[in-house]
Image: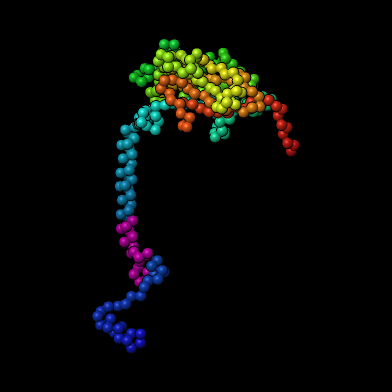
Amino acid sequence: MSKGKRNGEEIKTLMNGETREEPETLGQFLWNRDKGTILGRTGKSWFQIVVFYVIFYIILSAFFIGCLAIFLKTLDPKVPRFYGKGTIIGVNPGVGYQPWLKENPDSTLIKFNLQDPKTWEPYVSQMDTYLTRYNSSENTRDCGPADTNDELETNPDALPCRFDLGVFEKSNCGAKDQYGYKSGKPCVAVSLNRLIGWRPVQYQGGSVPEVIKDRYKSGDITINCDGATNFDKEHLGKVKYVPESGIDGRYYPYVFTKSYQQPIAMVKFESIPRNKLVIVECRAYALNIEHDISTRLGMVYFEILVEDKKPEAAPAA
């Protein structure tokens, strides 16, 4: 563009009352001395927008807290809002076992050396810790063979049945015998997951599964353990159940209460082979317990390895 033509355009612009503004630089956007703006806003504009958002977020927070308070009022601290059939909790209890070492939570291996007390002491310690909850008789009651926890569902002042560990002591699965680990006859505690209101349903007529037929007691949950494969079945050895009928059904249903003592049964492996890994599958049996290998419903797996060899000497410092 020629100089004369450019001057002509400038004169025309001035005659029309317009001024040409040069584009803002980054420095001018951050702080414009002529306009008195910071980031394109005046002090008054910044004050107004800050006040607006402070009030907006106060109202939003109050609304959220109010909704949360109303929601929490609808919940029962003792019972899940949704449980039972059709929920993620379901109606089929899972099976758990102890000792399960918290130091190695991903492992299901029970491994110890008969000639090295340091290897089986953690399992004894874990069993002691697990069974400590049964030492207290506070807020519990003695229950006879005909008693149950049924009243817990309707009477908030009712006391749950006290679970007696004496039957395990008599079978050498108690603390004084170190739960059989010192002698190479380990005892494993088996229990069911706690499901609110769940109780075992007894088998009718001749529907009792053959594997538990000689031990089944009406109303109880019978436990049966076997090898997971043919090799494991062959080497599992003699298994003793304490009590023989399994988990006593009179301690059901489970109702959330601080003093509730969960019933368990012990499985004693009396002739587990030495220096051989055996995979054990334990199933719980009642009419309303389903077994599913893919999801491990109604069953639990763990491995046992009882070593009997001289401990390796610690390396010299």
Q: Residue furthest right?
A: 316
Span of residues in magenta:
32-50
Q: Residue furthest left?
A: 16
Q: Give the percent coordinates (x, y) of residue 7.
A: 32, 86
Q: Is 172 displayed left or right of 207 in the figure?
A: right
Q: Is 4 displayed left or right of 104 in the figure?
A: left
Q: Residue at x 35, y 71 (%)?
A: 34
Is residue 284 inside the magenta stretch?
no
Q: Is 190 displayed left or right of 235 in the figure?
A: left
Depth check: give the residue in front, 25 or 84.
84
Q: Quadrant of the N terminus?
A: bottom left
Depth check: give the residue in front, 294 or 275.
294
Q: Quadrant of the C terminus?
A: top right
Depth check: give the residue in front, 264 or 140.
264
Can residue 160 be seen? no
Q: Give the percent coordinates (x, y) of residue 46.
A: 33, 60
Q: Give the percent coordinates (x, y) of residue 240.
A: 56, 17
Task: Look at the image and name its color scheme.
Answer: rainbow
Can residue 223 be seen? yes
Which corner quadrant of the image does residue 289 belong to? top left
Q: Residue furthest bottom?
A: 4
Residue 274 in the image: above or below residue 146: below
Q: Residue at x 54, y 17 (%)?
A: 241
**Number of marks in the rendered image:** 0
Q: Residue at x 31, y 47 (%)?
A: 60
Residue 8 in the image: above or below residue 107: below
Q: Give the percent coordinates (x, y) of residue 309.
A: 70, 27
Which corner quadrant of the image does residue 280 belong to? top right
